[in-house]
Image: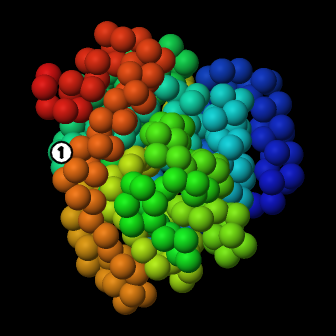
Amino acid sequence: MKKIDRRNFLKTVGLAGGMVAISGPKGFLGGIAYGAPTFTGVTYLTPGYQDLFPAIQAFVAELKKNAGDKLKVDFFDSQTLVKAAEQNSALRAGTIQFMFHTSSYITRTFKILGITGLPGIVDELYKHPKRLAMESPIWKACNDNLAKENIFQLTMGGGILEPEYIWSGAKQVKSLKDLNGKRCRIVSYEATEALKKFGAAGVNIPSSELYLAVQRGTVDAVVANVSTIISRKVHEQLKYVYKMPVTAFTISIFLLKDKWDQMPADQKDAFWKAAKYYDDFCAPRINSKFYPEVYWPVISKAKIEIVEPTKDESAEFAKQSQVVIDWWKNEVGEAEGQKVIDMAMGKA
């Protein structure tokens, strides 16, 4: 995908901003059409994510195909334009117009998205991906909440990716009891709070730094999806995976809501059709085919021991996770939070 020097890009943005100021909001200069608008999008993910990256590429390709001459698309991957932590600010500043983001990275900013990673809930969402599909009740509820922040979540990628499990090496974690005293790499706040109940200390380390963190012993265990483990080659240093579904995430696409609302119908239609394609091509395809056929065989070949939690352990984890669920409902509003949870659990 397209790469550019960040400094030169910002110069270009500055120049373009000046031209827009001269030409006016409709993009005309002296009565002459300025041309189709350019939509700049980003993902921090790299081509090394063999599961996720093709889905992102497919969305961009579909968007370009659907758009024709209605709009132009510039897309940047691998943090070549903005860092993962800068994406939200870049969207609000107008540096970019759409972004792919991992929900677990931004649940403290957009708390309603915590539903995608709540311990005790994610296993149900994994089993029933349609509950997060475009135009589903949860999708609508999330967007109603995000609208308060002027954010529109175009798609949740067709559901959560396979839940994040607990991976370990020399200091094994094969049960909940083994978590006591362990330093665990965890991204989501919700999962961090859940594992505290079992004596684990959460360490927030981005996936780009994970390999060295494990190698140097900065962490004893890793809470991650199988995609992160293989894409970052962390499996080379691991011996066990305890398949407790701790948390999960979506790879969603976000735009500013006011910009979406103001978008001409033909441009909006191009985005919508591409998102519908992505909704089918991302999580549903990856979970049902790619992971079992490509990634899990790699784990087996690496001789990583796969440990399934017992029924008692699963029940204990669900019990201890209730505190986190109650906290999240308090964060988003008791009534609204319970309504979304009921949707996730198939009760509404």
Give the image location of residue 264, x and y in percent: 44, 26
- Please tell me whether mark 1 sits on a helix, a strand or a loop: loop
Quadrant in the picture for residue 106: top right
Q: Residue furthest left?
A: 347
Quadrant housing the C terminus: top left
Q: Name which residue lies at 81% across and 60% down.
A: 5
Task: Sort mark 1 into few (<14), some (14-19) or many (20+) by Cα contacts within 10 Å.
Answer: some
Residue 342 in sight in this render: yes
Please identify the quadrant where the N terminus is shown. Answer: bottom right
Residue 285 lies in quadrant: bottom left
* 188 left or right of 252 in image: right
Q: Is residue 267 above or below residue 84?
A: above
Q: Nearer the viewer, residue 244 or 112?
A: 244
Q: Position of residue 72 (x, y in %)?
A: 55, 48
Figure check: 165 above or below 291 = above
Q: Quadrant of residue 16?
A: top right
Give the x, y percent position of residue 247.
40, 47
Q: Residue at x 57, y 57 (%)?
A: 182
Q: Position of residue 54 (x, y in %)?
A: 42, 66
- Residue at the image position 23 percent from the left and 32 percent from the top: 344
Residue 163 seen in the figure? no
- At 30% from the left and 35% from the top, the residue drawn is 319
User: How many marks overall?
Assistant: 1
Q: Nearer the viewer, residue 98 or 341?
A: 341
Three-letter code, disc 1 = His
Q: Which residue is mark 1?
A: 128
In front of the other: 318 or 212: 318
